[in-house]
Image (cartoon, rainbow, N blue to C red):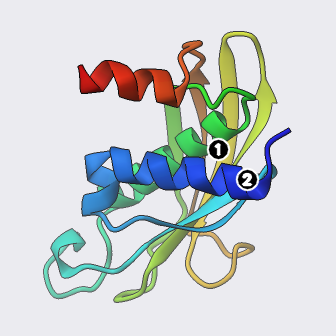
Amino acid sequence: MNTDEQLESVVQQFLHAIPHCRILGMEPEHVTSEGVVISMPYNEELEANPGTGIIHSGAITTLMDSAFGMSACIALPGFETCPTIDLRIDHLGLPDPFKPVRCFAEAYRVTKTVVFTRGVAYQDDRDEPFAHGVGTFMRTGRTLSEMAKELAK
C-alpha cells in the first residue's frame, strides 16, 4: 500500500509533467487513497466572457478531467498512466466570480482494463458543487516512471 506522502508525490509529478496543468495553475490541496482535491486559481485569462470573473467551463472540464485522471493513477499499485476513455461533466450552475475552483475526484472501481472515477467541482463547500461528473480511464500497464523514461529518449 502507498502512503499519502507517496500519493501526493505522484500527484505533484503529474501536475508538473502535464503542460496544461501547469499553465492553468493546478495545485493539489488534499491527496489520500480515498481521492484527491485539486484547485485552480481564478485567472482573468480563463474568463468565459471578459470582465465577468466567471471561469470558462472548458477550463473547469480540464480541471475535472485532470483530477479524475490523477485519482485513477493513484488508485493503482504501480501508478500506471491512464488516458481518458470517456468523460461526462454536468454543469449544474456557474461558479462564483473571481474565486478559485476545486475538484474532488475518486476512483470508485478498478478492473483489469478500466478505472472508473467520479467527482465534483466546487468552490467553498464540496456539498454545494456547481458541476459533477464521471470518467473512465484505460489501464496501460505502463508506470509513470516508465513513461517518463520513454519521453526522455
Residue designated by label 2: 35
Q: State left or right for residue 148 relative to residue 114.
A: left
Give the CA distance from mark 1 to mark 2. 6 Å
Image vertical order of residue 152 relative to residue 54, above or below: above
Label 1 packing within 10 angstroms: few (<14), some (14-19), many (20+): many
Q: State left or right for residue 41 relative to residue 122.
A: left
Residue 152 % position (x, y): 26, 26
Image vertical order of residue 18 relative to residue 36, above or below: above
Q: Quadrant of the N terminus?
A: top right
Q: Which mark is residue 71?
A: 1
Residue 51 % position (x, y): 16, 88
Q: State left or right for residue 24 relative to residue 137.
A: left
Q: Amino acid at mark 2?
A: Gly
Report the residue at 73% width, 36% height from top.
75
CB under 8 Å between callouts 1 and 2?
Answer: yes
- Mark 2, secondary structure of its residue: strand
Q: Quadrant of the C terminus?
A: top left
**Residue 90 seen by the camera:** no
Residue 81 % position (x, y): 52, 26
Residue 26 % position (x, y): 41, 64
Sequence-wise first label, 1 or 2: 2
User: Where, by quadrant of the figure, is residue 48 drawn?
Assistant: bottom left
- Mark 1, secondary structure of its residue: helix
Report the residue at 23% width, 86% height from top.
52
Q: Amino acid at mark 1?
A: Ser
